[in-house]
Image (tube, grey):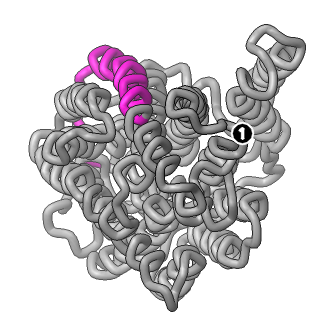
């Protein structure tokens, strides 16, 4: 394969233009996060109005995570080969189209399909924003900007549930505007990036994208998640369906590893994944994704179905967790930039994440909201200290030419963990709720046929006595899935403890001297704090050179 050819993105970016471009990237991240969080508190009403089931509730979230997971490594690899700005804009357009289709959905099935398409755009945005920032900002300073990144994510995460609740509770808007609301924001981000973002382009001839590997990974995970969703309800654990699905999934994933080991441009480069820091960061991200996505997705459902609060009230009740994310991401980011050390914050965050979920594991439908809020805050602090910093740890150990693949690999496994976590915990919740409702209805002398069927989320359509039983079942069952999240999070603690202590570099790590001059000029022009920074062209050296 020929060596990469670097072409400048136009004139070198001044410090002011770098900040302008960063604002556009943060807006892109904001709208991607908003698409998920604005739906979180509205989803119980959305699925209820569409007469959807608990399984469909789970798949509205899982579909987005799954397609985002499958496409994230492809976007990341494309970022190593093509113009990053164009790719970001394409991802925004895909996201916009998916949002509009979701807003016009007429059934739960259509909504799941639309969310799956929307996830393709989300996968691009979550990978490409990180890659673009990494191409502009030296690793040592990236801690501060990751703090801003976490802050934007926190604002979207705090504001999203509140906005979603207000939209659903406003009669002249309705739940469809939960999807339409992101369209103008994404359009503004598209225009802003067109005007401000300037990045060098790495181009290679005879480029080969490993679509086969990505397809095999997506297919293997999909079959596994479908099995998780239906086992023990549609068929038994020990059945030919289980053997076919689990066996088929393992075969597909084994083929994916075989293809990746031989692909010229693998979507998940095994050589990078096998590196000590990257492997541990991936393991930690997998655990954090399973615990965080899998647990947090059901908080809005707990407050509305289990406790009887309105969507707006549910949004307000999630503020403690979002405040924890906001505060810890900014503070930890600044402390990391000041000290250059990252491992202590990842370890502390992993421990707090597990502690918070362990506390949430004690809740039921009558637990004090003060205790629930305190536990959510601890979870938020843990998330803010781990998610972005695991990516930062990896970015500090690979060269610039591999940053796209390495960053997207971490995002890939985090999303994969979230996808599996949501699916597994959703299946556990559905089973426990169904069993509890059947038991309580029988005890109350109420016929179970038709009362605890597939559309338990349409609470308002049920008799008052049945509503009480359903709400109690959801409230009590939610604590059990948080305990599972805590157990999964322990893996993240182990991975964090095994990370090697690393001092973040102050230089941009570039493949050659010519490229170093071009990109470093873009990244540091006009920034006195970076004056006389020499470019470190080694791959693993953690020591800054000035």
Which residue in the protein does label 1 denote?
Answer: 449
Q: Magenta includes 469?
A: no
Q: Does 244 sit above or below residue 338?
A: above
- Extent of the magenta region: 478-507
For image coordinates 73% across by 27% down, the residue present is 233
Image x and y of residue 432, in percent: 53, 28
Q: Principal SS element in the magenta part?
A: helix
Q: Position of residue 284 (x, y in %)?
A: 40, 27
The residue that appears at 20% across and 50% down in the rendered structure is: 324
* Placement of 87 over or under 324, stated as above or below: below
Q: Is residue 504 left or right of residue 4?
A: left
Percent position of residue 180, x then y: 57, 81
Image quarter for residue 102?
A: bottom right
**Within the magenta stretch, is there residue 494?**
yes
Q: Nearer the viewer, residue 518 or 431?
A: 431
Q: Residues within 10 Å of mark 1 (few under 14, many from 20)?
A: few
Which residue shows up at 45% across the image and 40% down it? 474
In this rendering, would 506 be left or right of 291?
left
| Residue nearest the viewer, comparing 349 with 545 | 349
Depth check: give the residue in front, 221 or 444: 444
């Amino acid at each position: 394969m020929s060596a990469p050819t670097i072409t400048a993105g136009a004139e070198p970016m001044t410090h002011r233009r770098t900040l302008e471009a960063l604002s556009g990237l943060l807006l892109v991240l904001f709208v991607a996060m908003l698409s998920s969080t604005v739906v979180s508190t509205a989803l119980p009403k959305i699925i209820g109005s569409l007469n959807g089931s608990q399984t469909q509730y789970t798949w509205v979230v899982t579909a987005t995570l799954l397609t985002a997971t499958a496409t994230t490594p492809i976007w990341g690899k494309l970022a190593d080969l093509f113009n990053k700005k164009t790719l970001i804009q394409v991802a925004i357009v895909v996201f916009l189209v998916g949002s509009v289709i979701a807003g016009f959905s007429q059934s739960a099935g259509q909504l799941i399909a639309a969310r799956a398409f929307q996830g393709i755009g989300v996968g691009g945005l979550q990978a490409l924003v990180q890659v673009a920032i990494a191409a502009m900002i030296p690793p040592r300073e990236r801690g501060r900007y990751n703090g801003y990144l976490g802050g934007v994510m926190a604002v979207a995460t705090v504001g999203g549930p509140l906005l979603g609740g207000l939209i659903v509770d406003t009669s002249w808007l309705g739940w469809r505007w939960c999807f339409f609301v992101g369209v103008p924001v994404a359009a503004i981000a598209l225009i802003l990036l067109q005007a401000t973002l300037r990045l060098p382009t790495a181009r290679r001839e005879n480029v080969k994208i490993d679509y086969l590997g990505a397809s095999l990974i997506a297919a293997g995970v999909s079959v596994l998640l479908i099995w998780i969703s239906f086992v023990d309800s549609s068929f038994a654990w020990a059945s030919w369906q289980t053997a076919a699905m689990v066996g088929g999934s393992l075969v597909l994933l084994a083929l994916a590893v075989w293809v990746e080991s031989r692909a010229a441009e693998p979507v998940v480069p095994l050589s990078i994944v096998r590196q000590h820091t990257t492997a541990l960061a991936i393991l930690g991200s997998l655990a954090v994704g399973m615990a965080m996505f899998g647990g947090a997705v059901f908080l809005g459902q707990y407050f509305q179905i289990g406790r009887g609060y309105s969507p707006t009230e549910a949004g307000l009740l999630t503020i403690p967790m979002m405040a924890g994310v906001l505060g810890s991401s900014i503070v930890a980011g600044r402390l990391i930039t000041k000290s250059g050390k990252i491992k202590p914050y990842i370890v502390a965050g992993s421990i707090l994440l597990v502690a918070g979920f362990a506390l949430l594991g004690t809740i039921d439908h009558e637990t004090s909201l003060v205790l629930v809020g305190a536990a959510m805050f601890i979870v938020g602090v843990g998330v803010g200290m781990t998610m972005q910093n695991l990516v930062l740890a990896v970015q500090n150990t690979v060269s610039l030419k591999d940053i796209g693949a390495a960053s997207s690999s971490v995002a890939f496994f985090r999303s994969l963990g979230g996808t599996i976590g949501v699916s597994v915990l959703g299946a556990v919740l559905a089973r426990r709720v169904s069993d509890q409702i059947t038991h309580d209805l029988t005890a109350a002398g109420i016929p179970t046929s038709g009362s605890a069927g597939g559309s338990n989320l349409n609470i308002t359509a049920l008799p008052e006595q049945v509503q009480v039983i359903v709400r109690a079942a959801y409230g009590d069952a939610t604590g059990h899935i948080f305990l599972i999240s805590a157990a999964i999070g322990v893996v993240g603690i182990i991975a964090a403890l095994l990370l090697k202590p690393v001092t973040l570099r102050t230089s941009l790590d570039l493949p050659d001297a010519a490229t170093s001059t071009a990109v470093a000029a873009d990244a540091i022009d006009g920034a006195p704090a970076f004056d006389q920074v020499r470019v470190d062209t080694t791959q693993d050296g953690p020591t800054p050179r000035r």
